[in-house]
Amino acid sequence: MSLGTAPAAPAPQQSDAPLQIAGVAFRSRLIAGTGGFQSLQLLEQALRAARSEIATVALRRVAVDHRLTESIIDVLQAVGVRLLPNTAGCFTARDAVLTAKLAREAFETNWVKLEVIGDERTLLPDAPELLRAAEELVDDDFTVLAYTTDDPVLARRLQDIGCAAVMPLGAPIGSGMGIRNPYNIALIREAVTVPVVLDAGIGTASDAAIAMELGCDAVLVASAISRAAHPVLMASAIADAVVAGRNALLAGRIARRLHALASTPEEGLAQLT
Amino acid sequence: MILINGEKVEMPAGTSLLHALARIGITMTSTGVAVAVDGEVVPRTHWEAYALHDGARVEALTATQGG
């Protein structure tokens, strides 16, 4: 992206190709985070409104009696989304790798959204630990979608290791601050060939549209939907914004210019005075 | 004594992992759960035969909202 010229758009086409992650095709480009919903019923309604085909899930200790726990898995299976286990809360490569292995055992999927956090206040990723964990998991045949900073060099390193997608943050998790460095997100899109999923920071529908216009292949949204005053309506709004932003990218935006460029022809203008 | 999800439980050394898991309602047919002992994943097929040593740390995890 630059201020002077329009970004390079994909060749014009009638219908968009599906999103491809590790050889699996998805029509929806909105990945749903499941954290923060007041109830599983609300989560189910929001997932349907979001039209998502992938939803994240976390691993935590079994409560006093597992048989009494209402399972989020039942909800996700009823909606028909693919599970994407995360390693949220892990601060070391070792913990993240073990959590991914437990998730593979629990959910029978080798897909993992790899999060290795380096700071409690900002929940920003710890780059060296992230690279270490990604390498180990890729070697163990995991399909790794790596939550990362908006650093294009780190994104490329994650791709080189063998990650199936990179998930740069727009702003800290749950902050709703939008995309603080759109230029870096555009640079990441240039730097890698694997899917780029904008993760974290989205606060409302327009942020999701901007992510897609920057060339992101998908967005992951949790708090912006689950903590909205009306989560189901926001899920629908963000789903629409993702489609709108994607179509705008494919349509190819006009160049930005400092001065006006009349859209009405000057030729044939009347001489009235 | 063994630790199940951080809680001390009086069980003799040699208790099977499956027996210990029953304390928190987990059986062979429970879905969406995974278990680690002392930081290593123990696959479901090994739960019954796995003998816990004194002081073993059992972590039994399941799905929750997140991400």
Image (cartoon, coloured by chain):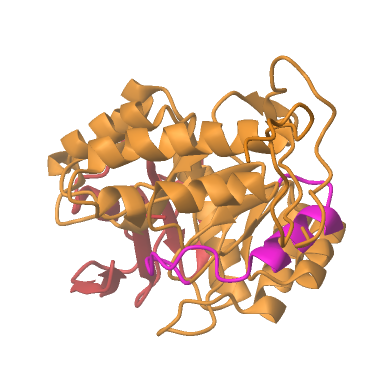
Chain colours: A orange, B red
The N terminus of chain B, quarter of image: bottom left
In percent of width and height, residue B55 lies at: 35, 77
Left or right, A269 with respect to A5, comes to: left
- Indicate left or right for A148 with A106 as reference: right
Residue A107 within the segment the image draws in magenta: no
Which quadrant would residue A175 be assigned to in this image? bottom left
Q: Relative to residue A72, is residue A75 depicted above or below? A: above
Is residue A185 in the magenta section?
Answer: yes
Residue located at (62% from left, 73% from top) = A93
The image quadrant that residue A69 belongs to is top left
User: Looking at the image, can residue B49 be seen?
Assistant: no
* Farthest-out residue, front: A273
Q: In which quarter of the image is the C terminus of chain B?
A: bottom left
Q: What stretch is highlighted in magenta?
A: A172-195
Q: Which residue is more in the foreground, A14 or B59?
A: A14
Eyeballing the image, is A81 above or below A214? above
Residue A78 visible: yes
Q: Which picture quadrant has residue A8?
A: top right
Q: Where is residue A233 in the image (x, y as percent from the top left)?
A: 25, 36
Q: Is residue A191 left or right of residue A238?
A: right
Residue B16, given in percent of the width and then of the height, sits at 35, 54
